[in-house]
Amino acid sequence: MINFKEKISEELEQIINISKKELETYIETPKDTKNGDYSFPCFRLAKELKKAPQIIANEIKEKINLENTGIEKVEVIGGFLNFFINKKVLIKEVLEGFEKQEYKDLKIGEGKNIVIDYSAPNIAKPFHIGHLRSTVIGGALSNIYKFLGYNVTGVNHLGDYGTQFGKLIEGYKLWGDEYDIDKDPINELTKIYIRINNLCKEDEKILEDCRNNFKKLEDGDSYCVEIWNRFKEVSLKEFQRVYDLLGSKFESWNGEAFYADKMQEVVELLEKSGKLVESQGAKVVDLADQGIDTPCIIIKSNGSSTYATRDLAAILYRARTYDFDKAIYVTSYEQILHFKQIFATAKYLGLDEKYTNGLIHVPFGMVLLPTGKMSTREGTSIKLEDLLNEAIERAKKIIEDKNPELEDKDLIAKKVGVGAVIFNDLSNNRVKDEIFDWDTILNFQGETGPYVQYTYVRTQSILRKAENVPSFRDVNIEKIDDNYSVNILKLIYDFEDILVEVTKKEEPSILSRYLIDLAKAFSNFYNENKIIGEEKEIENARLYLTKVVGEILKTGASLLGIEMPNKM
Ligand code: ARG
């Protein structure tokens, strides 16, 4: 497909003394189509050229040669040059490109390695709603990077290490028989944990035993390791049920424990760099000169390593093993300081700048119930598996009301219910807190997952009704000229750009918003245009467009982790 922005930049380069690559980054997409399809703001040039932006814009307009660009018109408004695409060129480009399935064959990321650290629940603790957001956002990013041709390693950095396991082992030793761990692993282990924690507060001797257990675990004591493995196994089995519902898959399950024997090197490297200092019995890296007030604790005063130490070992390991261009971490914004600290400390590990510059924290907001924050302490925590199952049940009720005759209701309800939860998680800017409200999430008319699915289903039912679905050869491009169709084609043209935008900002909501826009554009097209029963050439063109929209909606949704039903 023609890259209009590139074409415009090439022509601008002839006039302005700036490289076309840079010029391309100046080009914006106006919110209002009456300001054209692309606009070039001249404000940045004003200072250097010592002229008013509007004058510069007019001068460029006089000089620019748009003959082979696919642009048919340029207008000056204020300090902007507004470019208008030739609609015939657009239509032909998009449909021809689609015919060749060019949108699936993207090589933008070829040769680049991306590590995405996401989900990462903690063993023997509930998989909570924050982990759901991480799983969904990380999963979407992983899919999108892969689609663009990057080599992606999704890592589930499980919380399976730390002194709490010493306690849990002790509790298990004392009362393991009293609890039905196989039946309800995480709940039962949580009960044991709370009980042993209380006992530790009263009994110094027990606390000592717990510490010893952790030490033994670290030293590979077979009994402790065996129990710890069991905790891990039963927890993972429970987590897996959530992953199955969401369709989540990871390339690596190396959790914190994996780095147990790799932390010594971190300590040595930091010592060598001269940055590791004693502070109240602990070993810390002072980060004040990097503008971070809180030092990064590497070894606690009791000699044990920390969450940060393990993350530093993971950075070393990932740099060496995956040679990453970007290492992305998806967690709630509560961990912003933690990642600032470890990214700053990582600069003292002697790694190539390529790696330290490639570290990216992708924080997201809290999930709020209409009544306030969800948290374990206030008892408002919801078990994720229950939440997903409730979504499925609610979806099923709606489907039963709307379409009682439908076959495969259970499967469809699963796609709709789970899709609704996923879409909700991805539909707003990720750092914003999100309000979890069933009625909004499942509203078929709202800006929701079910709305996108419903629009897709509509495209499929139109295609089923058609006698035969035309292929590109049957389409007379001249017959596509109404604004509704052009709007759709413009959106289809943008698909690749949207995906690239997602990876620039690590923001999957850009794709969710796009799918809503595309679904709305299709609804307008459908409401205003007759499709079947029109004059054959028009019918063919519109059917073909319907097919294209369906395919892009389905592809886009699947990148977000949402499955499409064929009927609903
Ligand atoms: N297990 C952590 C938690 O539940 C998240 C881990 C995120 N990844 C990392 N490399 N620190 O808060």
Image (cartoon, rainbow, N blue to C red):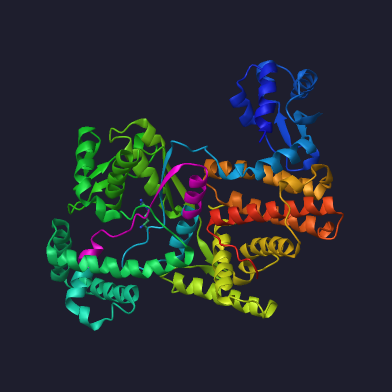
In the visual, does 466 lie left or right of 431? Answer: right
57 vs 368, left or right, is right
Left/right of residue 554 with respect to residue 43 in the rendered view: left
> Residue 161: within the magenta?
yes
Query: Looking at the image, is 426 positioned above or below residue 85?
Result: below
Q: Position of residue 279 (x, y in %)?
A: 22, 44
Where, quadrant-wise, is the N terminus in this rendering?
top right
Q: Please count the marks in the image.
A: 0
- Residue 77 in view in this figure: no
Q: Quadrant of the C terminus?
A: bottom right
Q: Position of residue 224 (x, y in %)?
A: 16, 65
Q: Residue at x 18, y 63 (%)?
A: 225
Identity of the residue drawn at 24% across and 32% down: 273
Q: Position of residue 359 (x, y in %)?
A: 40, 40
Q: Quadrant of residue 181?
A: bottom left
Question: Does the rendering let one see residue 268?
Answer: yes
Residue in front for this viewpoint, 380 or 456: 456
In the image shown, does 468 or 371 lie closer to the viewer? 468
Residue at 66% over, 44% down: 98
The magenta segment is 139-167
258 up-or-down from 494: above or below: below
